[in-house]
Amino acid sequence: MDNLTTITHRVLDGDSLGRPELLRALELSRPCPMELFAAANRVRRHFMGDAVTLCCIVPGRLGGCSEDCRWCSQSRLGPLGRESSTRTPREQIVQAARNAVRAGAACLGIVNSGRRPTDADLRDVRDAIDAIRRDPNAQPLRVCASLGELTAAQAQQLAQAGTFLYHHNLETSRAFFPQVVTSHSYDNRLATLRNAREAGMDVCSGGLLGLGESWEDRIDLALALRDVAPRVTPLNFLHPIPGTPLEHQPPMPPLDILRTVAIFRLALPRVDIKLCGGRTVNLRDMQSWIFHAGASSLMTGDYLTTAGRSAQQDAQMIADAGMTVVRDRL
Protein backbone atom coordinates (compact mmCIF):
# COMPACT_ATOMS: atom_id res chain seq x y z
CA MET A 1 0.00 0.00 0.00
CA ASP A 2 1.32 3.48 -0.88
CA ASN A 3 2.97 5.58 1.80
CA LEU A 4 3.35 9.37 1.65
CA THR A 5 6.80 9.14 0.10
CA THR A 6 5.51 6.95 -2.72
CA ILE A 7 2.47 9.18 -3.23
CA THR A 8 4.68 12.29 -3.38
CA HIS A 9 7.02 10.73 -5.94
CA ARG A 10 4.05 9.77 -8.10
CA VAL A 11 2.88 13.38 -8.18
CA LEU A 12 6.39 14.67 -8.89
CA ASP A 13 6.66 12.18 -11.75
CA GLY A 14 3.48 13.57 -13.33
CA ASP A 15 0.90 10.99 -12.21
CA SER A 16 -2.63 12.12 -11.35
CA LEU A 17 -3.80 10.78 -8.01
CA GLY A 18 -7.26 9.25 -7.82
CA ARG A 19 -9.76 9.26 -4.99
CA PRO A 20 -8.26 6.18 -3.24
CA GLU A 21 -4.75 7.66 -3.21
CA LEU A 22 -5.95 11.01 -1.88
CA LEU A 23 -7.98 9.30 0.84
CA ARG A 24 -4.90 7.25 1.68
CA ALA A 25 -2.77 10.42 1.98
CA LEU A 26 -5.40 11.89 4.29
CA GLU A 27 -5.49 8.73 6.40
CA LEU A 28 -1.71 8.72 6.72
CA SER A 29 -1.81 12.33 7.96
CA ARG A 30 -4.03 11.67 10.95
CA PRO A 31 -1.31 10.72 13.45
CA CYS A 32 1.13 13.34 12.12
CA PRO A 33 -0.18 16.01 9.73
CA MET A 34 3.30 17.50 9.39
CA GLU A 35 4.30 14.63 7.10
CA LEU A 36 1.42 15.47 4.75
CA PHE A 37 2.38 19.14 4.84
CA ALA A 38 5.97 18.25 3.97
CA ALA A 39 4.76 16.22 0.98
CA ALA A 40 2.54 19.05 -0.27
CA ASN A 41 5.30 21.60 0.30
CA ARG A 42 7.69 19.53 -1.79
CA VAL A 43 5.14 19.35 -4.62
CA ARG A 44 4.45 23.08 -4.36
CA ARG A 45 8.15 23.95 -4.56
CA HIS A 46 8.71 21.56 -7.49
CA PHE A 47 5.90 22.96 -9.67
CA MET A 48 5.43 26.53 -8.40
CA GLY A 49 8.73 27.49 -6.77
CA ASP A 50 8.91 29.82 -3.77
CA ALA A 51 6.82 32.44 -5.53
CA VAL A 52 3.47 33.83 -4.36
CA THR A 53 0.86 35.60 -6.44
CA LEU A 54 -1.55 38.09 -4.88
CA CYS A 55 -4.97 39.32 -5.88
CA CYS A 56 -7.49 41.78 -4.51
CA ILE A 57 -11.24 42.08 -5.02
CA VAL A 58 -13.77 44.87 -5.14
CA PRO A 59 -17.57 44.60 -5.22
CA GLY A 60 -19.16 45.83 -8.41
CA ARG A 61 -22.64 45.19 -7.07
CA LEU A 62 -23.37 44.22 -3.47
CA GLY A 63 -26.41 42.56 -1.87
CA GLY A 64 -29.91 41.86 -3.11
CA CYS A 65 -29.18 38.40 -4.54
CA SER A 66 -32.08 36.11 -5.49
CA GLU A 67 -30.15 32.86 -4.86
CA ASP A 68 -30.34 30.72 -1.71
CA CYS A 69 -26.67 29.90 -1.00
CA ARG A 70 -26.92 29.11 2.70
CA TRP A 71 -23.58 30.61 3.71
CA CYS A 72 -23.87 33.96 1.94
CA SER A 73 -24.92 37.20 3.60
CA GLN A 74 -25.88 38.56 0.15
CA SER A 75 -28.30 35.73 -0.72
CA ARG A 76 -32.02 36.01 -0.17
CA LEU A 77 -31.53 34.02 3.07
CA GLY A 78 -28.96 36.49 4.43
CA PRO A 79 -29.17 40.01 5.86
CA LEU A 80 -27.81 41.79 2.76
CA GLY A 81 -29.95 39.72 0.41
CA ARG A 82 -33.09 41.19 1.90
CA GLU A 83 -31.95 44.69 0.94
CA SER A 84 -31.69 46.33 -2.46
CA SER A 85 -28.37 45.87 -4.21
CA THR A 86 -25.92 48.77 -4.42
CA ARG A 87 -23.39 49.53 -7.16
CA THR A 88 -19.83 50.65 -6.57
CA PRO A 89 -18.97 53.88 -8.41
CA ARG A 90 -16.38 53.48 -11.16
CA GLU A 91 -13.90 55.80 -9.45
CA GLN A 92 -13.94 53.59 -6.35
CA ILE A 93 -13.17 50.56 -8.50
CA VAL A 94 -10.27 52.42 -10.14
CA GLN A 95 -9.00 53.42 -6.70
CA ALA A 96 -9.20 49.76 -5.65
CA ALA A 97 -7.03 48.96 -8.67
CA ARG A 98 -4.43 51.52 -7.60
CA ASN A 99 -4.44 50.06 -4.08
CA ALA A 100 -4.03 46.56 -5.50
CA VAL A 101 -0.93 47.64 -7.45
CA ARG A 102 0.57 49.11 -4.29
CA ALA A 103 -0.14 45.82 -2.50
CA GLY A 104 1.82 43.89 -5.13
CA ALA A 105 -1.26 42.19 -6.57
CA ALA A 106 -1.25 40.80 -10.09
CA CYS A 107 -4.99 41.18 -10.59
CA LEU A 108 -8.14 42.82 -9.31
CA GLY A 109 -11.41 40.90 -9.33
CA ILE A 110 -14.69 42.77 -9.86
CA VAL A 111 -17.30 40.71 -8.01
CA ASN A 112 -21.06 41.09 -8.39
CA SER A 113 -23.91 39.63 -6.38
CA GLY A 114 -26.75 37.97 -8.25
CA ARG A 115 -27.23 34.82 -10.29
CA ARG A 116 -26.22 36.36 -13.61
CA PRO A 117 -25.18 39.79 -14.94
CA THR A 118 -27.57 42.26 -16.52
CA ASP A 119 -26.68 44.33 -19.57
CA ALA A 120 -25.97 47.21 -17.17
CA ASP A 121 -23.61 45.01 -15.15
CA LEU A 122 -21.64 44.06 -18.25
CA ARG A 123 -21.46 47.69 -19.37
CA ASP A 124 -20.19 48.75 -15.93
CA VAL A 125 -17.48 46.09 -15.98
CA ARG A 126 -16.38 47.03 -19.49
CA ASP A 127 -16.21 50.71 -18.50
CA ALA A 128 -14.26 49.89 -15.34
CA ILE A 129 -11.73 47.80 -17.27
CA ASP A 130 -11.26 50.62 -19.75
CA ALA A 131 -10.78 53.17 -16.95
CA ILE A 132 -8.23 50.94 -15.19
CA ARG A 133 -6.29 50.44 -18.43
CA ARG A 134 -6.07 54.22 -18.93
CA ASP A 135 -4.92 54.95 -15.37
CA PRO A 136 -1.09 54.96 -15.15
CA ASN A 137 -1.27 54.28 -11.39
CA ALA A 138 -3.19 51.06 -12.00
CA GLN A 139 -0.55 49.40 -14.17
CA PRO A 140 0.40 46.58 -14.78
CA LEU A 141 -2.74 45.23 -13.11
CA ARG A 142 -4.95 42.73 -14.90
CA VAL A 143 -8.71 42.53 -14.31
CA CYS A 144 -10.83 39.46 -13.71
CA ALA A 145 -14.57 39.23 -13.13
CA SER A 146 -16.97 37.19 -11.00
CA LEU A 147 -20.51 37.98 -12.11
CA GLY A 148 -22.33 34.67 -11.72
CA GLU A 149 -23.65 32.58 -14.59
CA LEU A 150 -22.68 33.57 -18.12
CA THR A 151 -24.16 32.77 -21.49
CA ALA A 152 -21.75 32.19 -24.36
CA ALA A 153 -22.54 35.67 -25.72
CA GLN A 154 -21.92 37.35 -22.35
CA ALA A 155 -18.62 35.51 -22.00
CA GLN A 156 -17.60 36.80 -25.43
CA GLN A 157 -18.40 40.37 -24.39
CA LEU A 158 -16.25 40.10 -21.28
CA ALA A 159 -13.35 38.53 -23.15
CA GLN A 160 -13.46 41.22 -25.84
CA ALA A 161 -13.45 43.90 -23.13
CA GLY A 162 -10.15 42.57 -21.79
CA THR A 163 -11.24 40.32 -18.92
CA PHE A 164 -8.36 37.85 -18.79
CA LEU A 165 -9.80 35.46 -16.20
CA TYR A 166 -13.31 34.54 -15.08
CA HIS A 167 -14.01 33.40 -11.54
CA HIS A 168 -16.87 31.01 -10.75
CA ASN A 169 -16.55 28.52 -7.90
CA LEU A 170 -17.96 25.01 -7.87
CA GLU A 171 -18.11 25.55 -4.07
CA THR A 172 -18.35 21.89 -2.97
CA SER A 173 -18.83 18.39 -4.30
CA ARG A 174 -21.68 17.54 -6.66
CA ALA A 175 -23.16 15.24 -4.01
CA PHE A 176 -23.15 17.84 -1.23
CA PHE A 177 -24.12 20.86 -3.36
CA PRO A 178 -27.93 20.41 -2.98
CA GLN A 179 -27.51 20.61 0.82
CA VAL A 180 -26.38 24.23 0.57
CA VAL A 181 -27.83 25.54 -2.73
CA THR A 182 -31.16 24.69 -4.38
CA SER A 183 -31.86 27.73 -6.59
CA HIS A 184 -29.41 26.60 -9.28
CA SER A 185 -27.50 23.44 -10.12
CA TYR A 186 -23.95 22.15 -10.27
CA ASP A 187 -24.32 21.79 -14.02
CA ASN A 188 -25.20 25.50 -14.25
CA ARG A 189 -21.84 26.29 -12.71
CA LEU A 190 -19.95 23.94 -15.00
CA ALA A 191 -21.69 25.44 -18.06
CA THR A 192 -20.50 28.93 -17.10
CA LEU A 193 -16.92 27.75 -16.79
CA ARG A 194 -17.15 26.14 -20.25
CA ASN A 195 -18.56 29.35 -21.73
CA ALA A 196 -15.79 31.42 -20.18
CA ARG A 197 -13.06 29.15 -21.47
CA GLU A 198 -14.56 28.88 -24.96
CA ALA A 199 -14.65 32.69 -25.10
CA GLY A 200 -10.89 32.75 -24.55
CA MET A 201 -10.71 33.57 -20.85
CA ASP A 202 -8.77 31.56 -18.30
CA VAL A 203 -10.85 30.31 -15.40
CA CYS A 204 -10.52 30.62 -11.64
CA SER A 205 -12.59 28.07 -9.76
CA GLY A 206 -12.46 26.62 -6.28
CA GLY A 207 -14.71 26.19 -3.33
CA LEU A 208 -15.89 27.00 0.14
CA LEU A 209 -14.94 24.48 2.81
CA GLY A 210 -16.42 23.99 6.27
CA LEU A 211 -20.07 23.94 5.19
CA GLY A 212 -20.67 20.57 6.86
CA GLU A 213 -19.27 18.48 4.02
CA SER A 214 -17.24 15.29 4.55
CA TRP A 215 -13.59 14.72 3.72
CA GLU A 216 -14.79 12.65 0.79
CA ASP A 217 -16.72 15.70 -0.46
CA ARG A 218 -13.56 17.80 -0.25
CA ILE A 219 -11.60 15.27 -2.28
CA ASP A 220 -14.44 14.98 -4.81
CA LEU A 221 -14.38 18.77 -5.21
CA ALA A 222 -10.64 18.67 -5.90
CA LEU A 223 -11.16 15.97 -8.53
CA ALA A 224 -14.04 17.89 -10.14
CA LEU A 225 -11.80 20.93 -10.35
CA ARG A 226 -9.08 18.88 -12.00
CA ASP A 227 -11.56 18.11 -14.79
CA VAL A 228 -12.26 21.87 -15.09
CA ALA A 229 -8.49 22.59 -15.29
CA PRO A 230 -8.55 26.08 -13.73
CA ARG A 231 -5.56 28.37 -13.81
CA VAL A 232 -6.27 29.33 -10.19
CA THR A 233 -8.16 27.47 -7.45
CA PRO A 234 -9.29 29.72 -4.59
CA LEU A 235 -9.98 27.97 -1.29
CA ASN A 236 -12.33 29.73 1.11
CA PHE A 237 -13.21 28.58 4.61
CA LEU A 238 -16.56 29.37 6.15
CA HIS A 239 -16.70 32.50 8.26
CA PRO A 240 -20.23 32.13 9.70
CA ILE A 241 -22.23 35.32 9.21
CA PRO A 242 -25.01 36.17 11.69
CA GLY A 243 -28.41 36.02 10.03
CA THR A 244 -27.48 33.28 7.56
CA PRO A 245 -28.64 29.66 7.84
CA LEU A 246 -25.06 28.56 8.62
CA GLU A 247 -24.40 31.15 11.31
CA HIS A 248 -23.93 28.40 13.94
CA GLN A 249 -21.83 26.04 11.82
CA PRO A 250 -18.72 25.03 13.84
CA PRO A 251 -15.49 26.38 12.30
CA MET A 252 -12.92 24.07 10.76
CA PRO A 253 -9.91 23.54 13.04
CA PRO A 254 -6.71 25.10 11.68
CA LEU A 255 -4.98 21.74 11.16
CA ASP A 256 -7.95 20.47 9.14
CA ILE A 257 -7.75 23.58 6.97
CA LEU A 258 -4.06 22.93 6.36
CA ARG A 259 -4.77 19.25 5.61
CA THR A 260 -7.32 20.42 3.04
CA VAL A 261 -4.80 22.74 1.39
CA ALA A 262 -2.28 19.89 1.23
CA ILE A 263 -4.76 17.45 -0.34
CA PHE A 264 -5.67 20.04 -2.98
CA ARG A 265 -1.98 20.56 -3.76
CA LEU A 266 -1.48 16.81 -4.28
CA ALA A 267 -4.58 16.69 -6.49
CA LEU A 268 -3.78 19.88 -8.42
CA PRO A 269 0.02 20.11 -8.47
CA ARG A 270 0.33 22.68 -11.28
CA VAL A 271 -2.53 24.98 -10.24
CA ASP A 272 -2.10 28.24 -8.31
CA ILE A 273 -3.86 27.39 -5.03
CA LYS A 274 -5.07 30.63 -3.50
CA LEU A 275 -6.15 31.10 0.13
CA CYS A 276 -9.05 33.53 0.33
CA GLY A 277 -12.07 34.15 2.55
CA GLY A 278 -12.04 32.90 6.12
CA ARG A 279 -8.24 32.65 6.24
CA THR A 280 -7.74 35.17 9.02
CA VAL A 281 -10.59 34.21 11.32
CA ASN A 282 -10.11 30.44 11.00
CA LEU A 283 -6.33 29.97 10.83
CA ARG A 284 -5.45 32.68 13.33
CA ASP A 285 -1.76 32.25 14.31
CA MET A 286 -1.24 29.43 11.79
CA GLN A 287 -1.72 31.55 8.67
CA SER A 288 1.92 31.35 7.63
CA TRP A 289 1.65 27.55 7.54
CA ILE A 290 -0.43 27.72 4.36
CA PHE A 291 2.71 27.82 2.20
CA HIS A 292 4.21 24.80 3.95
CA ALA A 293 0.90 23.00 3.30
CA GLY A 294 1.08 23.75 -0.44
CA ALA A 295 -0.58 27.12 -1.07
CA SER A 296 1.02 29.39 -3.65
CA SER A 297 -1.28 32.41 -3.74
CA LEU A 298 -3.20 34.77 -1.48
CA MET A 299 -6.12 37.13 -1.65
CA THR A 300 -4.96 40.14 0.31
CA GLY A 301 -6.92 43.02 1.81
CA ASP A 302 -10.63 43.03 2.58
CA TYR A 303 -13.20 40.61 1.19
CA LEU A 304 -16.72 41.51 0.06
CA THR A 305 -18.58 41.73 3.35
CA THR A 306 -15.86 40.88 5.90
CA ALA A 307 -12.48 42.40 6.72
CA GLY A 308 -9.17 40.75 5.86
CA ARG A 309 -5.61 41.50 6.85
CA SER A 310 -3.68 44.47 5.62
CA ALA A 311 -1.40 44.11 2.62
CA GLN A 312 1.53 45.07 4.86
CA GLN A 313 0.84 42.19 7.24
CA ASP A 314 0.58 39.71 4.38
CA ALA A 315 3.77 41.04 2.78
CA GLN A 316 5.64 40.52 6.05
CA MET A 317 4.24 37.00 6.42
CA ILE A 318 5.33 36.10 2.87
CA ALA A 319 8.83 37.47 3.43
CA ASP A 320 9.15 35.69 6.79
CA ALA A 321 8.22 32.41 5.07
CA GLY A 322 11.09 32.89 2.60
CA MET A 323 8.72 33.48 -0.31
CA THR A 324 8.73 36.17 -3.01
CA VAL A 325 5.73 37.98 -4.51
CA VAL A 326 5.55 37.75 -8.32
CA ARG A 327 3.18 39.17 -10.90
CA ASP A 328 4.22 37.26 -14.01
CA ARG A 329 2.58 33.93 -13.17
CA LEU A 330 -0.91 35.30 -13.86
Image (tube, rainbow, N blue to C red):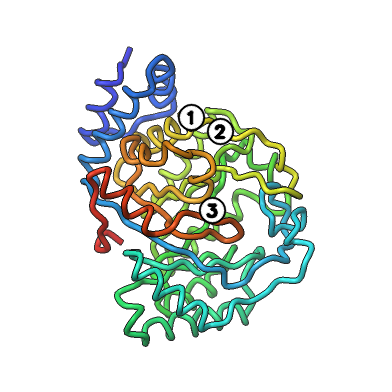
106 in relation to 134, above or below: above
26 in relation to 159, above or below: above
Q: Amino acid at mark 1?
A: Asp
Q: Position of residue 169 (x, y in %)?
A: 53, 52
Q: Residue at x 54, y 53 (%)?
A: 190
Q: Position of residue 220 (x, y in %)?
A: 50, 35
Q: Nearer the viewer, mark 3 or mark 1?
A: 1
Q: Quadrant of residue 8?
A: top left
Q: CA distance from mark 3 to mark 1?
A: 27 Å
Residue occupied by mark 2? 252
Sequence-first tag of 3 and 2: 3
Q: Residue at x 53, y 28 (%)?
A: 216
Residue occupied by mark 3? 190
Q: Amino acid at mark 3?
A: Leu
Residue occupied by mark 1? 256
| Contact check, label 3 and label 1, Cβ < 8 Å | no
Mark 1 element type: helix
Mark 2 element type: loop
